[in-house]
Image (cartoon, helix red, strand yellow):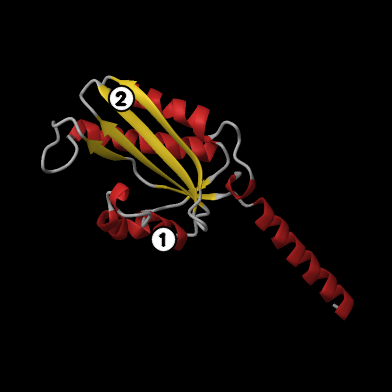
Amino acid sequence: MNAFSYLGATAALVLGLAAADAQAATRVAVFDFELFDTSGEAGPSGPKPEEARRLALITDDLRERLKKAGYEVVDLSPKKAEITEASPFRNCNSCELEIARSLGAQIEVIGLVQKVSNLILNINFQLRDVATGEVLRAGSADIRNNTDESWLRGVSYLIRNRLLDPPLTGKAAP
């Protein structure tokens, strides 16, 4: 291989890698939804088992929908201990941004379900730019009834009408 062939091959490789980087999916850290129970029904050990299961249910649903929309959902398990120590995120003054940053995420999603009573709940999310901390999107949906169906409908509404519509642009685009 002569010098020109080598330079041409090297340039093609560099351009190919640059094109692959340009097409790489946006990396998003989706933290588990948390429960803020103001109903007076909460026990000292945290959410009731069925509500803990519902938090996981809507978190998993959000992650799957973001994957289907073209995002790369970051694995949070390497930072499990830090996440547990920092939780609940509503009290940590954006401490989750550093966790998301350390995992290589470009954007993050945090969510909160506020339980007012067993009939009235509110699902909230916030999507932020990890580099700047800027809130890119936020949403809230009131739901009635403390069931799997109502929780899934609430988070589905937020994803369709607040998180992904209109489509995200710039660094937050998939």
Q: Where does the image place residue 111, in percent across and percent down from the top left?
A: 37, 40
The answer to whether residue 121 is left or right of residue 162 is: left
Residue 2 is at least partly visible in this image: no
Residue 3 is at least partly visible in this image: yes
Q: Residue at x 35, y 24 (%)?
A: 142
Could you say which quadrant of the image residue 46 lies in? top left
Residue lying at the far left of the rendered structure: 44
Q: Residue at x 55, y 44 (%)?
A: 71
Q: Where does the image place residue 86, in percent across and percent down from the top left?
A: 29, 56
Give, as a three-letter code, the residue at label 1: Glu
Q: Nearer the viewer, residue 123 or 67?
A: 123
Q: Residue at x 41, y 34 (%)?
A: 61
Residue indicated by mark 1 = 98
Question: Which quadrant of the figure contains the C terminus?
Answer: top right
Could you say which quadrant of the image residue 1 lies in? bottom right
Q: Where does the image place residue 73, in percent across and percent down from the top left?
A: 48, 47
Label 2 and label 1: CA atoms lie apart by 32 Å
Give, as a three-letter code, the residue at label 2: Asp
Q: Residue at x 71, y 61 (%)?
A: 18
Q: Which mark is residue 131?
A: none
Given this view, does label 2 or label 1 mark the residue nearer the observer? 1
Residue indicated by mark 2 = 148
| Looking at the image, residue 67 lies above or below residue 22 | above
Packing grade of label 2 (10 A; few <14, some 14-19, many >=20) is some
User: Under tag 2, what secondary structure?
Assistant: helix
| Looking at the image, residue 149 lies above or below residue 75 | above
The answer to whether residue 129 is left or right of residue 119 is: right
